[in-house]
Amino acid sequence: MITDRLLLGAHVREALNRGQAVVALESTIITHGMPYPQNLKMARSVEDLVRKHGAVPATIAIMDGQMVAGVDEAALERLSEQGHAASKASRRDLASALVQGGLAGTTVATTMMIAAMAGIHVFATGGIGGVHRGAETSFDISADLEELSRTPVAVVCAGAKAILDIPKTLEVLETHGVPVIGWRTDDFPVFYSRTSGHKLDLRFDDVDSLADMLHLHFDLGLGGALIANPVPEAFEINRETAENWIKAALHQADMRGVRGKDITPFLLNAIFELTGGKSLKTNIELARSNAEVAARIAVALARRG
């Protein structure tokens, strides 16, 4: 049975039993998104922010043959120290990762799946995956997009990662019927930058109204929803500057033949090196901002039962 493979942290199990607000957090941002020890500091900080705003954090990972929703401090340290030595598990990798044991960071898609199994409906991440540049020939499209269409979880993010083809990503989300909601913005953000130049059809400025919409969306069985929360203005990186970094990183990836699920962590690391670490600060702050917004949404949803 699936419950044999799903382990809830004691704090998460208690919160769910009491009907309290819970926010899911992914683990590839820890294992593959940033170096040690910054990844551990970020993970602790994000969990603390969720608690500060009235919700219970549930960092999700694959650990020793189990899907863990709500890792403890020792597990958080283990994930952080292992970094790229841990696997990266998306939907297709889930069963094999469980059978093989060991550690795996969960992507947006896999975190959504496990969160839904646990009964958690709000999830904070950095940026979602999407349609990669050159996908018209490579067909490289993240599983995150289809997962959003079928799994009833609201994903709070700073938009899609800037390394992606943003127009095509938005088009695929529309095709799959995923509502893309701007949180206090009319423009879709792109990770490092607050705007992409692509306008959104939906905007909410009030958390209670957004919670009403999400509650009904889930009741109607319409799958997931994407909530785009721009990076805090103080940590924004100019779009033109970010684009120059991305082009240089993509060139490195092409020269080295990096493909598939290795491309995103490679590009993020290349940009980190190209910027002398400046991109990491932005990455951390947008993750913190998304956690705060997600906690507020989760609290509002919990009031609706």
Image (cartoon, rainbow, N blue to C red):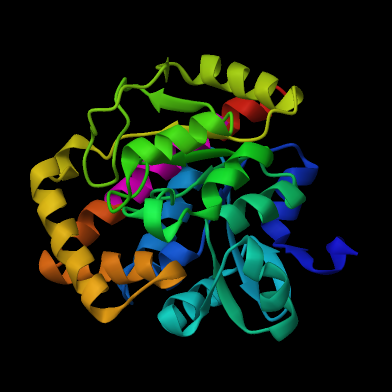
Residue in the picture at 49% in, 21% down: 207
Q: Position of residue 295 (x, y in %)?
A: 51, 38
In this rendering, would 251 be left or right of 295?
A: left
The residue lying furthest to the front in this view is 137
Give whichever of 280, 305 is nearer the camera. 280
Tell me the quadrant of the picture where the N terminus can be found. Answer: bottom right
Q: Main secondary structure of the magenta part?
A: helix
Q: Is residue 305 visible?
A: no
* Residue drawn at (44%, 44%) of the image: 291
For the C terminus, give its image quadrant.
Answer: top right
Image coordinates of residue 57 in percent, x first then y, are: 56, 51
Q: Quadrant of residue 303?
A: top right
Camera-side residue of 45 and 92: 92
Front-most of residues 27 and 8: 27
Q: Residue at x 70, y 85 (%)?
A: 100
Q: In the drawing, does residue 109 fall left or right of residue 286?
A: right
Instruction: Determine the residue positioned at 42% across, 63% down.
Output: 29
Q: Position of residue 260 (x, y in %)?
A: 44, 68
Rendering quarter of residue 23 = top right
126 above or below 264?
above
Q: Position of residue 110 (x, y in %)?
A: 61, 58
Quadrant location of residue 225? top right
Count of numbered marks? 0
- Residue 262 in the magenta stretch? The answer is no
Residue segment shown in magenta:
285-297
Would you say residue 136 is visible in this rendering?
Answer: yes
Name the one closer to the observer, 99 or 302.
99
Against 159, residue 130 (above or below) is below
Residue 294 belongs to the span the image colors magenta: yes
Relative placement, left or right, of 192 versus 108 is left
